[in-house]
Amino acid sequence: MRGRAGLPVGALDSVRTRRILAVCFDFIAVSIFSFGLWLALLVLTLGLSLVLLPPLFPFVAFFYNGLTVSGRKMATPGMRAMGLEIRTNDSGDRVTFLAAAVHAVLFYFSWMFPPIFLWSLFSEDKRCLHDVFADVIVVRRI
């Protein structure tokens, strides 16, 4: 049985709440990965990386989201824990690495303007504005 926009019934149930919890989990995971990489580079360069390295969080987040969302499970570890996945909006196929990475960049950019997240309250398919620009949709794994 199909619901709105050709999605299975229940595909959008409690997506917003699950996304918030998934973001919390993924933020912690990216922070741990970033700190681990920073610490490893600090030791390997004998402290010189403190002067030369740019902040690692954006780079780690870019590849974390790009690789996990474009992978076969179509979700970050936090999204998998919450039973979510990302698909292309038009065909429902797996998202490419570039689209997933752009989605992540737009998501982190959205944090500079938090009212942007209110868009999903008025969107019929519960997509945030960064989802619309990346042409993806977050649904429950059914």
Image (cartoon, grey):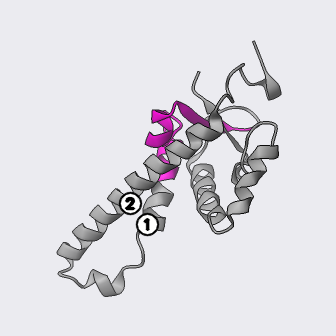
Q: Amino acid at mark 1?
A: Phe
Q: Residues within 10 Å of mark 2 (few under 14, many from 20)?
A: some
Q: Tell me if residue 106 can be seen.
A: yes
* The quarter of the displayed image where residue 11 is located: top right
The residue sitting at 77% across, 51% down in the picture is 119
Residue 106, percent across and down?
A: 65, 60
Do callouts 1 and 2 mark residues in contact (Cβ within 8 Å)?
A: yes
Labelled disc at residue 57: 1
Across and down, in percent, residue 43 comes to 18, 74
Describe the element under mark 2 as helix, strand or loop: helix
What is the span of residues highlighted in magenta in the rendered image?
A: 64-89
101 shown above or below 56: above
Q: Between tags 1 and 2, which lies in front?
A: 2
> Which residue type carries mark 2?
Ser
- In the picture, the disc for residue 133 is none
Residue 132 shows in the view: no
Horizontal relation, residue 30 to residue 141: left or right: left
Which residue is drawn at the image coordinates 43% and 61% (left, top)?
A: 60
Q: Quadrant of the N terminus?
A: top right
Q: Is residue 49 magenta?
A: no
